[in-house]
Amino acid sequence: MTFDLFDDLPSAPQAPEWLEPGAVVLRGFALEQAAALLEAVDAITAQAPFRHLITPGGKRMSVAMTNCGPLGWISDRSGYRYGPVDPDTGERWPAMPPIFQQLARDAAEAAGYPGFAPDACLINRYAPGTRLSLHQDRDEGHYAHPIVSVSLGIPAMFLWGGAERADKARRVPLLHGDVVVWGGPARLRFHGVLPLPAAQHPLTGACRINLTFRKAG
Ligand code: SIN
Ligand code: FE2
């Protein structure tokens, strides 16, 4: 099942859509590399499988996650943090593929943040019904660098909020190949993802894959 809303949107790269100063949606920015990115995700998850992390409050996250790069984002009863080792395997996180690094750098540059060199890539897998509640990305210890977030597979409704959790959040449909970049004055904006409607995508089946690039160290 797909939505007319999504079907009608163009699938070629489009002009940047600014959400506010510092934050932009680059439609279709990752389309050309999408198949290669997903192949790389398969190789990464063969080494560091997707898992459902536990929040510090003891809840199992509905989004399945893994990481690549020198640092990976993890959550457990003791808190949220970045670390070099996958706690499930005891091994370092798989290396960040060069095409990931290049895409993140290019997208950041297109958004006005040249020279972005991420050291962490969180890989999120959303199944239908999965959601990510409003949160800020603030475990990086410093906020000088932007966040680059790549959407692959079935569509999602991204929530773009404000500086406070209670601020009204705007709904931004994100499609396969879209990239969102936020930094500078928008770096600590609350954001999230509404429960994913069921759909199928030729490259990912019934799921959405999100790559979130950060400079954490
Ligand atoms: C995130 O905030 O970590 C992911 C956002 C998304 O899946 O689009
Ligand atoms: Fe986030």
Image (cartoon, rainbow, N blue to C red):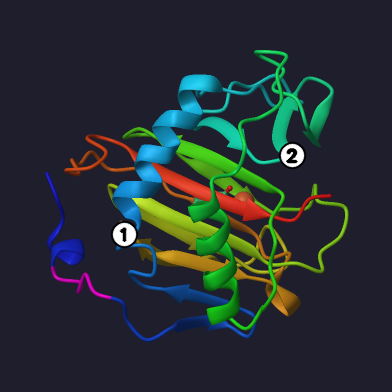
* Tag nearer the camera, 2 or 1: 2
Marks 2 and 1: CB-CB under 8 Å?
no
Residue at the front extreme of this rendering: 98
Identified at 72% across, 28% down, the residue is: 75
- Where residue 175 is drawn, which disc sits there? 1
As drawn, 201 above or below 145: above
As drawn, 14 above or below 157: below
Q: State which region is magenta.
A: 8-12
Quadrant assignment, res 173: bottom left
Neighbours of disc 1 within 10 Å: few (<14), some (14-19), many (20+): many
Residue holding disc 2: 71
Neighbours of disc 2 within 10 Å: few (<14), some (14-19), many (20+): many
- In the picture provided, is 148 more to the left or to the right than 45? right
Q: Is residue 53 magenta?
A: no
Whichever of callouts 2 and 1 sits on the residue coming sooner in the sequence is 2
Identified at 69% across, 27% down, the residue is: 55
Q: Amino acid at mark 1?
A: Leu
Identified at 70% across, 36% down, the residue is: 72
The kind of secondary structure the magenta stretch mainly shows is: loop
Q: Position of residue 203 (x, y in %)?
A: 23, 42
Residue 72 or residue 137, whichever sits in front:
72
Q: Secondary structure at mark 1?
A: loop
Quadrant assignment, res 60: top right
Q: Could you give the CA–CA distance between mark 2 and mark 1, rounded to whole angstroms? A: 27 Å
Q: Position of residue 114 (x, y in %)?
A: 67, 78
Q: Amino acid at mark 2?
A: Leu
- In the picture provided, is 159 more to the left or to the right than 11? right
Q: Quadrant of the N terminus?
A: top left
Q: Position of residue 139 (x, y in %)?
A: 80, 47
